[in-house]
């Protein structure tokens, strides 16, 4: 069982917005503003999409945004495009003993 | 531009030790910016952080794997390595090396290497 809980799947039509949740605890997501999000297409390495909860690396579309409330972080993708269909993983710093923990992943289907 | 490349055997026998190396190019393994790390992904499953090593030599391991994992750095070769002992079929996975930064996340990944544990 993963340390962070994500929905197994979400779907949306092109142009719509979707949100993927990532629920942790007061020991990880709730204690640190160090949640990152990764996009993974089949057979490829993960790609960093969001770091420090809401910051986008250079080159990542502004259609991707991140937020946090309490022990839950969220990734929102607006203006869905076919190329957004992929698996998405959240990751949080969890203190000096555990360091990093991942969510179980969410499969995004663009209808 | 930082690039990472994993290398090592694709097949390991049960109870033996899995050994992988990650070669760093475009940057120095001695950089204080990175917590050089290993992440794995079993077939059809999610990502699991295995552990990381800081330039100072400090290591950080997933508590669930800590008793079997060793991560080390070879500064002369600009490489870092993973050793996972007493492997079982459950350790079959794609193994990625990455360059996590504490604030900025894991922004550079290797392409991954598949390791199968089987006799």
Image: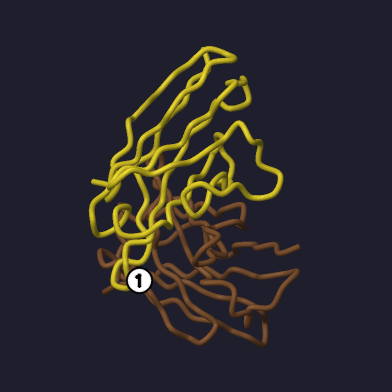
Chain colours: A yellow, B brown
Residue A64: percent from the left, percent from the top?
57, 35
Q: Position of residue B46 (x, y in %)?
A: 39, 43
Residue B118 in view of the camera: no
Tell me where residue A37 appears, x and y as whole percent. Answer: 48, 45
* Outermost residue, front side: A69
Image quadrant in which you'd find residue A60: top right
Would residue A54 be found to the left or right of residue A70 on screen? right
Which residue is depicted at the point 47% across and 55% down?
A: B115
Q: Is residue A84 above or below residue B76?
A: above
- Direction from residue B68 to residue A67 in the image, left or right: right
B119 to A110, vertically: above or below: below
Tally the numbered discs.
Answer: 1
* Relative image position of residue A88 (x, y in whole percent): 47, 37
Quadrant in the picture for residue A82? top right
Q: Nearer the viewer, residue B39 or A96?
A: A96
Residue A39 vs residue B69, the one in the foreground: A39
Which residue is at 57% across, 65% downward?
B99
Left-right relation of B74 to A101: right
Which residue is more in the foreground, A67 or A60?
A67
- Whether residue A74 is visible, yes or no, is yes
Q: Residue at x 49, y 55 (%)?
A: A52
The residue tagged with tag 1: helix, strand or loop? strand
Crowd class of label 1 (few under 14; some 14 to 19; many from 20; radius 10 Å): many
Q: Please give the chain letter of the residue carrying mark 1.
A: B
The residue singled out by tag 1 in the image is B61
- In the displayed structure, A75 sits above or below A30; it is above
Query: Which is more toward the observer, B90 or B79?
Result: B79
Is A98 positioned to the left or the right of B108 in the image? Answer: left
């Amino acid at each position: 069982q993963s340390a962070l809980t994500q929905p197994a799947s979400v779907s949306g039509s092109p142009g719509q917005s979707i949100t993927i949740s990532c629920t942790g605890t007061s020991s990880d997501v709730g204690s640190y503003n160090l949640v990152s999000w990764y996009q993974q297409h089949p057979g490829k390495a993960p790609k960093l999409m969001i770091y420090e909860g809401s910051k986008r690396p250079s080159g990542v579309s502004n259609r991707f945004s991140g937020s946090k409330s309490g022990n839950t972080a969220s990734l929102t993708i607006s203006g869905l495009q076919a190329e957004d269909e992929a698996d998405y993983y959240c990751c949080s710093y969890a203190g000096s003993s555990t360091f990093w923990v991942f969510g179980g992943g969410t499969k995004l289907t663009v209808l | 531009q930082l690039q990472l490349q994993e290398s090592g055997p694709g097949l390991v026998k049960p109870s033996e030790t899995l050994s992988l190396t990650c070669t760093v190019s475009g940057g120095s393994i001695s950089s204080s910016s990175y917590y050089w790390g290993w992440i794995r992904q079993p077939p059809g499953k999610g990502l699991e952080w295995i552990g990381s090593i800081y330039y100072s030599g400090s290591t950080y391991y997933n508590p669930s794997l800590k008793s079997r994992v060793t991560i080390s750095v070879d500064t002369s070769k600009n490489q870092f390595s993973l050793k996972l002992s007493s492997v079982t079929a459950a350790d079959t996975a794609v193994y990625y090396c990455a360059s996590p930064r504490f604030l900025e996340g894991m922004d550079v990944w290797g392409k991954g290497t598949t390791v199968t544990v089987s006799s």
